Image: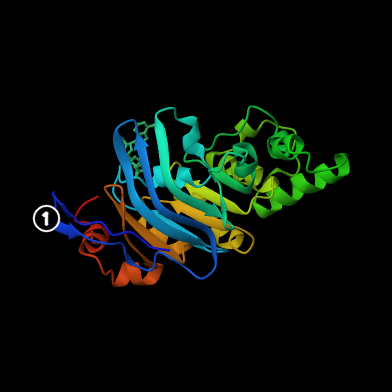
Amino acid sequence: MKVQSNRETEDSLNIEYTDTVGQPLCDDPKISTRNVDVFYADNQAIHDVSLDIGAHQVIALIGPSGCGKSTYLRTLNRMNDTIDICRVKGQILLDGHDIYQKKQDPVLLRARVGMVFQKPNPFPKSIYDNVAYGPRIHGLTRNKAELDDLVEDSLIKAGLFQEVKDRLHAPGTGLSGGQQQRLCIARTIAVQPEVILMDEPASALDPIATAKIEELINELKENFTIVIVTHSMQQAARVSQRTAYFHMGRLIEVGETDQIFTNPSHELTEKYITGRFG
Ligand SMILES: Nc1ncnc2c1ncn2[C@@H]1O[C@H](COP(=O)(O)OP(=O)(O)OP(=O)(O)O)[C@@H](O)[C@H]1O
């Protein structure tokens, strides 16, 4: 498939933007996006992005504030559908199937492609009910014993079970910020997604809670494909295998994380990672 070319001058830095450099495509894509444009009314926030998300990998999306990382992330499970003025063009395939086709139910899509947000947002329910919520809605278990097992297993995978096993019926909102975020990850995992989208999942957390989330991301990639938006380059370097650098709505460079941080090919990437803007 053709990856289209764009040519224009990036005014503020006087650097020419050409095609995405690096390796935007991969051999074993879980999600393939091609020529994606996103508009908020007349304002184009994403320009012609073509990128593959490899299966069982963590890919980090980085770039200056407002460059479109969250907007692009939200195209992957149609979260942008909830914004009236937002329009998405181009092709987004999950396991080769177009997620924007009419017959695709967005609720079922979001069970396959789950999302964890910047601020932990547990429901005002018990720890148990937070995790059981999705499986109940989607009818994933046949009885209470199966649901109990699924809740326990999800809390174990989210690295939270030991801390909450004696108070499963206490409110989720009573946990610390880091615990609440792991509860939200458990809630996402409970519906057995294939992909987890994380939009700055640790930005509201202290360094210890952040380290736990990063450890968890490393473990989760065995079973899930993960796309993470982060403002922290250290975090991107610690958790991801691939990194994609966005600038003013365009995908500038994609590559192995080590290469992006030690030997970027594009001048814009280099300027960002050396802290000259952002
Ligand atoms: N709901 C919205 N309505 C209108 N415009 C929006 C909306 N969300 C984002 N935008 C615009 O789209 C562009 C990209 O924003 P986006 O939040 O995707 O960038 P970002 O790289 O994730 O930024 P940040 O790092 O600050 O979170 C910005 O110009 C922003 O103002």
Of 3 and 262, nearer the camera is 3
List the residue tagged with mark 1.
14
Residue 188 location (% of width, % of height): 63, 44
User: Measured along the vertical axis of the image, is residue 60 above or below residue 155?
Assistant: below
Q: Is mark 1 within 8 Å of ligand 1?
A: no
Direction from residue 38 to residue 109 in the image, left or right? right
**Amino acid carrying mark 1 in the image:** Asn
Direction from residue 152 to residue 143 in the image, left or right? right
Of 95 and 65, nearer the camera is 95
Residue 129 location (% of width, % of height): 72, 34
Residue at x 55%, y 62% (from the top left corner): 218
User: Measured along the vertical axis of the image, is residue 244 above or below residue 138?
Assistant: below
Task: Give the image quadrant in which the ligand numbered 1 is located.
Answer: top left
Residue 158 location (% of width, % of height): 64, 51
Of 178 and 118, nearer the camera is 118
User: Measured along the vertical axis of the image, is residue 264 above or below residue 154?
Assistant: below
Residue at x 37%, y 59% (from the top left corner): 244
The reply to whether residue 183 is in sight is: no
Q: Residue 242: which quarter of the image?
A: bottom left
The reply to whether residue 113 is in sight is: yes
Residue 230 location (% of width, % of height): 40, 51
User: Measured along the vertical axis of the image, is residue 272 above or below residue 260?
Assistant: above
